[in-house]
């Protein structure tokens, strides 16, 4: 089983077919960065059209059982998530509405301070806000997973400890291996995983040691070391694949509507667009390369199976429905 914990591609029949060639059984896709509720509804509508148009390639994912159905019929299950809490605006009631529409993940922040928590680019990390704690409770109740991929350290640790259900960092790597602001320090990873949460390893070059030149061996050795340190049962892949987008889209991701200037974020003024992917992971067809690389650094077939999808499947099964 192959499950990707995060992608934000310029979706097309080509990419859906590449998923099938790569044997990708499920993907968590971003359908909102800075969109408010009504704009997000339009994105749900677009996906409804794709599900109808490409029903031989993709299906809507709401529960882990949909992954089984997708796998049995040679399709990919698509699960929705938000990289910002903007789709709930300032209305806690929209948590349940968005879950009913199909959302299964929501980040509490995207780099900046939000109404709920602090993003990883802020100078001061104030942790979960009063509204943040209430929203986490509501997310726990309905089965909308708390995602802290772009959040600051204190906020992430507080979310992991406060949440009654496991949370996720869907796409990031250990800070020790690559000291990007978005990558996570050991105490953050420990807080998430010891509470049953998941870390999805990112393939986005700004999160990789040596960026585009990162080798498959380096990446897989990092995965193996992380498994040795925190256990293999709470780790997966969250590729953060942003395939086929024009550079204007990465400006939207970083800037949204909060500034009039371009925020280069993890890039630089010299390279403001999307970075080139490593040669061993260009698109969904390359997932088998990761499996081969993990085995080459000494991971067992059972461990590789967990990393490539088994752990995400178990997490989806436990956390996408109402609290019991």
Image (spheres, helix red, strand yellow):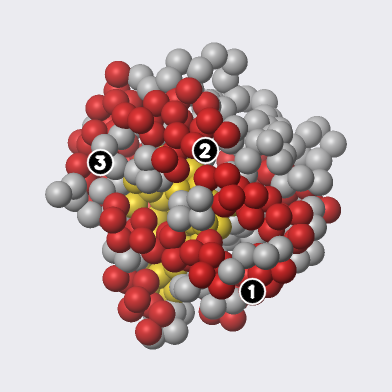
Q: Residue at x 26, y 48 (%)?
A: 143
Q: Secondary structure at mark 1?
A: helix
Q: Name the spot of residue 52 as percent of width and height, x first.
A: 37, 75
Q: Name the spot of residue 187 as percent of width and height, x first.
A: 53, 30
Q: CA distance from mark 3 to mark 2?
A: 20 Å
Q: CA distance from mark 1 to mark 2?
A: 26 Å
Mark nearer the N terminus (1 vs 3): 3
In the displayed structure, 289 sits above or below 165; it is below
Mark nearer the N terminus (3 vs 2): 3
Q: Residue at x 62, y 44 (%)?
A: 173
Is there CB contact under 8 Å for labels 3 and 2?
Answer: no
Residue 263 appears in which quarter of the rendering?
top right
Is there CB contact under 8 Å for labels 1 and 3?
Answer: no
Q: Is residue 37 left or right of residue 173?
A: left
The residue where tag 3 is placed is 140
Mark nearer the N terminus (1 vs 2): 2
Furthest residue in direction left, as rendered: 324
The residue where tag 1 is placed is 288
In the displayed structure, 217 sits above or below 189; it is below
**Mark 2 crowd level (few <14, some 14–19, many ≥20, 10 Å Cα):** many
Residue 38 appears in which quarter of the rendering?
top left
Q: Residue at x 51, y 32 (%)?
A: 188
Q: Name the spot of residue 14 as percent of width and height, x first.
A: 60, 75
Q: Is residue 288 left or right of residue 95?
A: right
Q: Which mark is residue 189?
A: 2
Q: Secondary structure at mark 3?
A: helix
Answer whether residue 166 is visible to the viewer in this image. yes
């Amino acid at each position: 089983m192959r499950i990707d914990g995060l992608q934000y591609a310029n979706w097309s029949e080509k990419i859906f077919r590449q998923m099938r060639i790569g044997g990708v059984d499920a993907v968590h896709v971003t359908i909102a960065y800075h969109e408010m509720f009504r704009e997000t509804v339009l994105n749900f509508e677009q996906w409804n059209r794709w599900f109808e148009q490409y029903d031989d390639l993709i299906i809507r994912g709401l529960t882990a059982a949909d992954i089984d159905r997708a796998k049995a019929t040679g399709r990919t299950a698509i699960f929705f998530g938000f990289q910002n809490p903007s789709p709930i605006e300032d209305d806690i009631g929209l948590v349940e509405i968005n879950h009913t529409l199909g959302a299964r993940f929501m980040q509490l922040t995207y780099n900046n301070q939000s109404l709920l928590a602090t993003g990883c680019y802020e100078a001061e990390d104030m942790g979960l806000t009063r509204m943040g704690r209430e929203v986490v409770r509501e997310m726990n109740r309905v089965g909308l997973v708390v995602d802290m991929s772009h959040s600051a350290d204190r906020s992430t640790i507080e979310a992991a400890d406060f949440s009654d259900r496991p949370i996720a960092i869907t796409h990031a790597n250990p800070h020790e291996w690559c000291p990007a602001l978005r990558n996570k320090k050991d105490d953050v990873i420990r807080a998430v995983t010891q509470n049953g949460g998941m870390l999805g390893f990112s393939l986005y070059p700004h999160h990789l040691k040596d960026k585009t030149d990162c080798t498959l061996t380096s990446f897989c050795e990092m995965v193996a070391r992380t498994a040795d340190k925190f256990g293999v049962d709470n780790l997966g892949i969250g590729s953060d694949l942003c395939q086929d987008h024009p550079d204007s889209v990465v400006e939207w991701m970083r800037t949204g509507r909060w500034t009039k200037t371009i925020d280069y974020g993890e890039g630089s003024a010299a390279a403001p667009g999307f970075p080139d992917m490593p040669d061993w992971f260009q698109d969904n067809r390359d997932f088998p390369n990761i499996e081969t690389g993990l085995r080459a650094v000494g991971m067992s077939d059972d461990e590789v199976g967990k990393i490539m999808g088994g752990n995400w499947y178990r997490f989806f099964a436990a956390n996408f429905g109402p609290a019991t």
